[in-house]
Amino acid sequence: MDSPPEKIPVRTYSPAPAMADPLNLLREMFADLRISRGLAWQITLRDFKALYRQSYAGYLWAFLPPLFASATFIILQSGNVVNFAKTDIPYVAFVLIGTILWQVFADSLSNPMRVMQSSKPMLTKINFPREALILSALQMSLINFAIRLVILIPIALWFRFPIGGGTLLFPVGILALILLGTTIGLFLATIGMLYQDVARGLMLVTNLWMFLTPVVFPVTGNGLAGRLMQINPVTPLLETSRDWFTGKQPDMLGQFLLITALTLVGLAIAWIVYRIFLPRVIERLGM
């Protein structure tokens, strides 16, 4: 027999600020996180099917953007239209892996806002644990990456990258990229419910951000772009993940650990901000 669905606990709401009792706030947050797992999965399935519905190419759209972006730079490099610094691995592998890893981050950056936009009718009409939307955004990011493994695995086999301890750590790098994107996206998603400019501006910033990250060319210290690439928080996460996948010793492991630790702290803060301010946003949406 199927187990009965978990009930949402009945709470007495008070006009007192949520941060007046931080311990009680944290208890409620983790309780709602636990009971929202089933609902989060249903939202994920709904959004995943909607993402590829009424599309002739269907699920191929999960592969086409990184493949076309990679092909563009491979053609430019092979035709000497652009000359990037020499990479430690074949350039084709470098750009394919980098583009897929960047897409993992970009998806996780936009997923919180996308999930909240698609769930706007639910938010204004139904009382449910809002943590379900955060879990759904994370699940969608993980599913999209799992699909793109279909590209990464043949790359590893074709270029005969060694399998070792670093390979086992590669999922840690993916998780770090997803958590960083989700953290930033969660900060933006709440205000993005009110203003469409946030989503449009995020798209513009993401396009520029990619060229300040070692996605299609290696890290350089030259000029303003090089300095921005050095302080870009995505750089050590993407570089270390690519090094692990290709069997190299990571050069930016210290920065990777620092950014990951800061990401976990930032995710906790973003969750609290989301928890406190989302009800006020919903009130404005319902006006």
Image (spheres, rainbow, N blue to C red):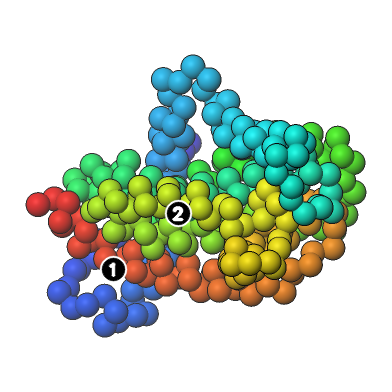
Nearer the N terminus, badge 2 or badge 1? 2
The residue type indicated by label 1 comes to Ile
Residue beneath the point at 61% across and 37% down: 69
Q: Are marks 2 and 1 in contact (CB under 8 Å)?
A: no
Please tell me in which quadrant of the rendered image residue 222 appears.
bottom right
Name the residue: 73% across, 56% down.
Answer: 218
* Front one among 188 and 96: 96
Comparing labels 2 and 1, the label whose residue is closer to the camera:
2
**Is residue 160 visible in this depiction of the protein?**
yes
User: Is residue 5 toward the left or the right of residue 173 in the image?
Assistant: left
| Mark 2 nearby-residue class (10 Å; few <14, some 14–19, many ≥20) | few
Q: Is residue 62 left or right of residue 40?
A: right
Of 235 and 194, the residue lying toward us: 235
Q: Secondary structure at mark 2?
A: helix
In the picture, residue 283 is in which quadrant?
bottom left
* Front position in the image: 10 or 81: 81
Give the residue number, with chain letter if any, for mark 2.
Answer: 205
Residue placed at 41% from the left, 30% from the top? 50
Residue where numbered disc 1 is placed: 276
129 left or right of 145?
A: left
Q: Is residue 6 above or below residue 75?
A: below
Q: Residue furthest bottom?
A: 20
Please state the horizontal and vertical placement of residue 271, each as a whole percent of the image: 40, 66
Considering every residue shown, the one lying at the far top of the view is: 56
Q: Residue 245: horizontal and vertical position, in percent?
A: 78, 51
Left or right placement of residue 228 versus residue 77 in this view: left
Q: Residues within 10 Å of mark 1 (few under 14, many from 20)?
A: some
